[in-house]
Amino acid sequence: MKKLLIILIVFLGYNSSAQTNTFSFSKDHDALLVQDLSRSAKFYSEVLGLEEIDNGGLPASIRWFQLIDSVQIHLIESEEIPATHKGVHMSLNTSELDKFMKFLQEQNIDFENWPGESTNTNTRPDGVKQIYLQDPDGYWIEINDNQL
């Protein structure tokens, strides 16, 4: 009984401290390892339309891109590229998803819905329409029409 009481006190103490966490986080950046920095930079600037920004004095093997909300994507040239899986993806939203899909088709850039049907969208249970595409290194990117 004494062990149960100690476990309960420890659990309640841990649980109450987790609930009083007052930290406030917002996204700063994602960092991606890429094999060909120029090819990947071209994709993020020309396909996704992201602005390239100064990389803060880092080596030329690292390039930074910025979304309209100031969140950044850092591309780091590397010989090692992690395995990719659609369930592990970056997600971006746009109010012009249909226009973006048409642009992708005009550029012969493949995209699909979650089940993998080419040039199709799907709608999540919350009503958000989405597509998925891959960057030159195979990273999955979800593009959706969510209104944040």
Image: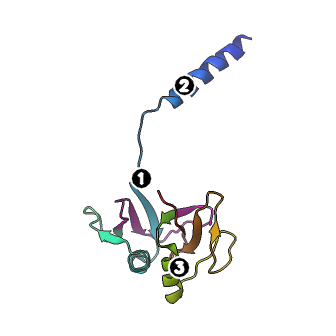
Report the amino acid beneath label 1: Lys
Between tags 1 and 3, which lies in front? 3
On the image, the x and y values in percent for residue 127 come to 61, 61
Report the amino acid beneath label 2: Ser
The boundaries of the magenta stretch are 64-90
Above-or-below relation of 121 to 70 = below
Q: Residues within 10 Å of mark 2 (few under 14, many from 20)?
A: few
* 137 and 49: which is toward the camera: 49
Mark 2 and mark 1: Cα distance apart in space: 26 Å
Residue at the spot of label 3 = 101
Residue at the spot of label 1 = 27
- Contact, mark 2 vs mark 3 (Cβ under 8 Å): no
For the question of whether residue 83 can be seen, the reply is no
Q: Residues within 10 Å of mark 3 (few under 14, many from 20)?
A: many
| Disc on the earlier residue, 1 or 3 | 1
Picture quarter with the N terminus: top right
